Image (cartoon, rainbow, N blue to C red):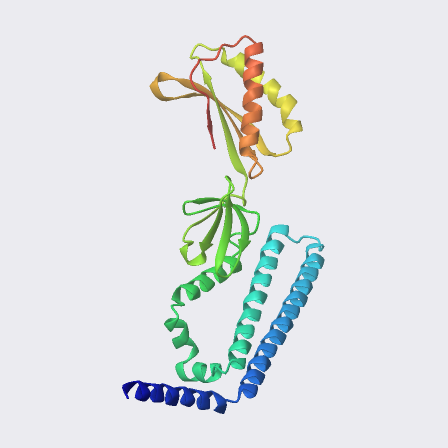
Amino acid sequence: MDHLLLTSSITAQTNGWVRYFQRINWSQIMDKVLGTGLEIVLFSLLFLVVNSIGKRLINRGFRTYTQRPGVSSTRAKTMHTLSINILSYTIFFFYLYAVLSVLGVPVGSLLAGAGIVGIALGLGAQGFVADVVTGFFILLEGQIDVGDAVQLGEVTGTVTSVGLRTTIVKSYDGTVNFIPNRNITIVSNLSRSNMQALISLPMRADADLNQVREVIGEVNDALVPKVKAIRQGPDILGLTPGANGTFSYQVKFLTENGEQLAVQRKFLAAYIEALKKAGIELPSAALTLTK
């Protein structure tokens, strides 16, 4: 008897589920799913086409702009990158709005009910707003451009991208640093002025300084016209006292930004070779390069 009651109960439940699934309009559901999927695909294709056309127009516009006389190439690259970023953010926003609307999410009601500021704060967008505001003023004031050598806090390298949200700096060892703009408090731009190249030659106190000056002058006369990166100098500073009773003979240059180390090495090697040929003995103390 218990077996018959259990079988009857299972049969009744099975029949109930069958009747429930039979009442579902599977055709309507499939039509809805396929229609929604097709709309999303069409919207995706549409926004991909708009994004592609927009980028082509921006690229063409900046190619024409950079051909004008007096236009800074680094500034043009910075504004080019910014324009691409703004286009991408704008298209993504409208694409997301369209997809949510197709899925039936009442985006308009949410924005109207909660307010755009309330939603932004609710999503933790305070940092994003700070990034955008800081990035706007960095670009407005022209603090850095693409291609500039900079130091941003502990990061030193070359700027590869300046956006409203992040700035990308490639370190000299190849590391790519993505820096949120709100974290940029001090900008040290190393590409906006000439840089100093100071060469210090260790020198004996009893050295013939007139002969040293003559030899260095001869090297300068022969080498300076060949080095286009020199902007000012060389200025022969002469003998300078150092630590522990040592002395050094110093020569100073002002060079094109980024070329100071190359100029230092080139002239240091030439000075040492010329001094040795002239019979001027140099002490064995380590040679120093400063900038």
Quadrant in the rendering for residue 36 = bottom right
Q: What residue is rendered at 66% in x and 28% in y?
A: 225
Count of numbered tags: 0
State the residue at coordinates (70%, 57%).
63
Task: Tell me: residue 183, above or below residue 128.
Answer: above
Residue 115 at x, y = what percent? Answer: 41, 80
- Residue 214 visible here: no
Q: Image height check: is 186 above or below 39? A: above
Residue situated in front as seen by the camera: 51 or 285: 51
Q: Nearer the viewer, residue 78 or 13?
A: 13
Residue extending furthest top?
279
Q: Quadrant of residue 79?
A: bottom right
Query: Residue at 64% across / 73% down in the picture?
Result: 46
Outermost residue, front side: 1
Percent position of residue 249, x then y = 47, 20
Does residue 166 appear left or right of residue 52 in this picture? Answer: left
Q: Residue at x 45, y 85 (%)?
A: 109
Task: Pinpoint residue 41: horizontal percent, then vertical percent.
Answer: 61, 74
Residue in the foreground of this view, choosing between 34 and 234: 34
Quadrant containing the N terminus in the rendered view:
bottom left
Where's residue 73, x and y in %? 64, 51
Residue 182 visible in rendering = yes
Question: As rendered, which of 255 and 239 lies closer to the eye?
Answer: 255
Image height of 148 relative to 50, above or below: above
